[in-house]
Image (cartoon, rainbow, N blue to C red):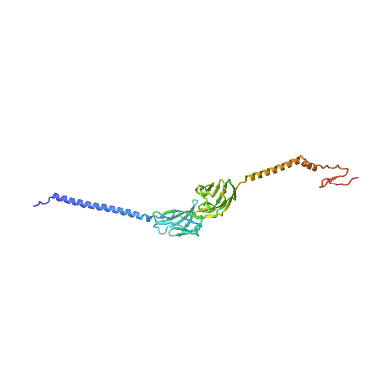
Amino acid sequence: MASPPSIHSTALQATLRMYSQTERIDTKMAITRLVCCFLVLLATHCCLPTLAVVLKTNDPTPWTNEFESIELSCLIESISTNNPRIEWKKIQNNEPSYVYFDKKVSGDLESRARIREPATLVITNATRSDTAEYRCEVTAPSDQKIFDEILISLVVRVKPVVPKCSVPKSVPVGKSAELRCVEEEGFPKSQYQWFFNKEEIPDDPKSSPRFLNSSYMLNGDTGTLKFTEVRKDDAGSYHCRAKNDAGHAECAAQKMEVYDLNVTGIVMGVLVVVVVLLCITLGICCAYKRGYFANQKEAGNNYKVPAKGDGVDYVRTEDEGDFRHKSSFVI
């Protein structure tokens, strides 16, 4: 027969059971604490956005052509305030001015802009003066973060007008010539192209067999086309095109003639002038030697005043040598 368990073994078993139960309880409590911490952190991260106003935009650098419409998007990602305050400001030369304030559009956009919910600004019939930076501001008093803003840079592109072109009518062979093209209305600033007989002139003459022997410099920024030495082949029709992102415009074609310099004719002309001047000089000298100018001077001063008689005064009239009595004889 088996002997009954001793008192010591029974106590040991009871102690082990109690320790095991205590260990399981501690493990459950630790897991519970971890779960609670995780839930608290999760709740905190989920609630923070709802306690702060946050803005975003679909396009921070929009553009449009003149007289077209454009939207400046200002989207509210998160907010808890029911009726936030929305404002738009236009910034030019570092000076802000209100565009939308107290739920009203103001300034030069008063009749050309509106707010599309919740805060997007829509501009119709855009003009070049609308090119500026715009700031969307939202204030939410009930949120933990009560204010947010975004900055949007708007560019209104303006098509160039017909440029003013200057082409010399005639240039001698071997001389320099400058063609000018100017346009100041387009925005962004216009770039320029020159055309010769309806064919575009490349920036580098060496890049085209047609202009390989030409000696010119083309500046697309200023619109100048300079020939250092004009050739006979450079004679023809020239016109200029001003262009930017909004479009382009061209001036009417103008002809430039190139003629040979007649050196012989110039020399002969100079010789003729010299001969004429020599003849005039010789004629004047001969006249002096013959006393022509001296006789004329003496003839003019050859008059002698007649002696006065007793009681008679003589007065000279307009005709030289003609006298009349001023008073009668006195007896």
How many numbered markers are drawn?
0
Q: Nearer the viewer, residue 233 or 251?
A: 233
Residue at horizontal 37 percent and vertical 55 percent from the top: 49
Where in the figure is residue 218, as x and y percent of width and height?
53, 48
Position of 73 compared to 186: left or right? left
Residue at horizontal 69 percent and vertical 43 percent from the top: 275
Q: Is residue 306 above or below residue 138?
A: above
Q: Nearer the viewer, residue 107 or 277?
A: 277
Which quarter of the figure is the C terminus placed in? top right
Q: Is residue 249 visible?
A: yes
Where in the figure is residue 64, as x and y percent of width and height?
48, 56
Position of 292 compared to 219: left or right? right
Where in the figure is residue 7, as x and y percent of width and height?
13, 50
Position of 324 compared to 59: left or right? right
Identify the residue at the far front of this view: 264
Residue at horizontal 75 percent and vertical 41 percent from the top: 286
Residue at horizontal 16 percent and vertical 51 percent from the top: 13
Q: Nearer the viewer, residue 126 or 79?
A: 126
Q: Quadrant of residue 311?
A: top right
Q: Is residue 220 visible?
A: no
Where in the figure is residue 255, as x and y percent of width and height?
58, 52
Identify the residue at the far left of this view: 1
